[in-house]
Amino acid sequence: MAALNEFSLIQTYFNQAAPEGYLGVGDDCAVFAVRPGYQLAVSTDTLIEGRHFFADTDPYQLGHKALAVNLSDLAAMGAQPKGCVLALAVPAINQPWLQQFSAGFYALAQQANCPLIGGDTTRSRSELIFTVTVFGEVPLTQALRRDLAQVGDDIWVTGTLGAPDLALGYLSGQWPLDSQRLAQTRSLLEAPQPPVHFAPHLLGHAHAAIDISDGLLQDLSHILQASRCGAQLEWSQLPMHPALQGIHTTQQLKSVLTGGDVFQLCFTAPASERAYLLKLAAQQGVTLSRVGHITETPDLVVLDAHHQPLTLPSQKGFDHFSL
């Protein structure tokens, strides 16, 4: 392969044509319009090798995840994706790696209707670093927010819980390798599937929402703090991934309640919306579980099968500065 510089790298791997109505890669700024009556939703996330992913992570999966973690934020607001920009820092130009990374990124961008319309490339000292900024649009005053939960609301969770934490534990050597369980869970850690097409249909039906990135207890607590309320969860109703069946209860509690990298939704909605939400989930092919309800007392309680409070893990979720 011919050697590439910064500009030919962009031209080769990150220069797919932008949709009609966009000014994309190739100018100083990307330009696009938001429909009248809509607001722009913007979110940024950075992934750093050794902190957010392993050095040997498949580059196609990594390209997918670099965008997926941001799409999850748009989903939490009920926003329709509009476009994204990528800042890429690499220690050297590895063309086979770049080909796979960009292919994974573009595949999800196309699936989510979120075209790559700009960004930056630079050289890092040693590790890979990606920063993605996503743009979405949401009708005026209708965005799902953390501070709008109401007492009596049902609490819902999309997808399953615990699998990414289990995979991370095996890959990092926290516990002895179980190859079968790792095979069941690794893709959910390295290539999450946020419900980006499901979320906009929650507008006008759900009250508050957040994406589960740092653990259910921690992320739900953000809703409770912002909305000045509490929650009661039913352990038996939490959608534990099947790979966690048969492992020690202590590990189940940790992975399900505090495990991060899920990138699914936790949201609240009035009981009157149950039929609509279940029908919507069936139409969209989304796993949806009603796991508890919002309470007036500002406590977060998880009840066991006998309706008794469980002893919760002391660490409620992931914190970049706690380790």
Image: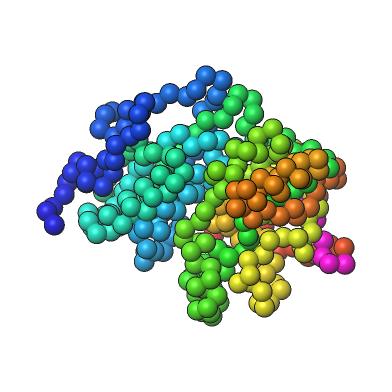
Taking the image as shown, residue 61 lies to the left or right of residue 26, namely right
Seen as rendered, the residue at the extreme top is 36
- Residue located at (69% from left, 32% from top): 204
- Where is residue 169? Give x, y as percent: 54, 70
Q: Nearer the viewer, residue 55 or 187?
A: 187
Placement of 22 over or under 126, stated as above or below: above
Residue 308 vs residue 213: left or right? Answer: right
Q: Is residue 271 visible?
A: yes
Q: Quadrant of the image for the N terminus?
A: bottom left
Query: Residue, x 36% and y 26% (percent of image)?
Result: 21
Residue at 44% of width from left, 53% of height from top?
A: 65
Indicate the quadrant containing the C terminus: top left, top right, bottom left or bottom right.
bottom right
Left or right: residue 121 versus residue 160 is: left
Residue 304 horizontal/vertical position (percent): 82, 65
Magenta span of residues: 300-306
In the displayed image of the protein, which residue is found farthest to the left? 2
On screen, 58 above or below 210?
below
Residue 222 placement, left or right of 91: right
| Residue 225 visible, this angle | no
Q: Per the image, is 309 magenta?
A: no
The spot of residue 179 in percent (x, y) is 50, 79
What kind of colouring is applied to the model shown? rainbow
The answer to which of 21 and 214 lies nearer the viewer is 21
Q: Nearer the viewer, residue 221 or 162?
A: 162
Residue 302 counted in the magenta span: yes
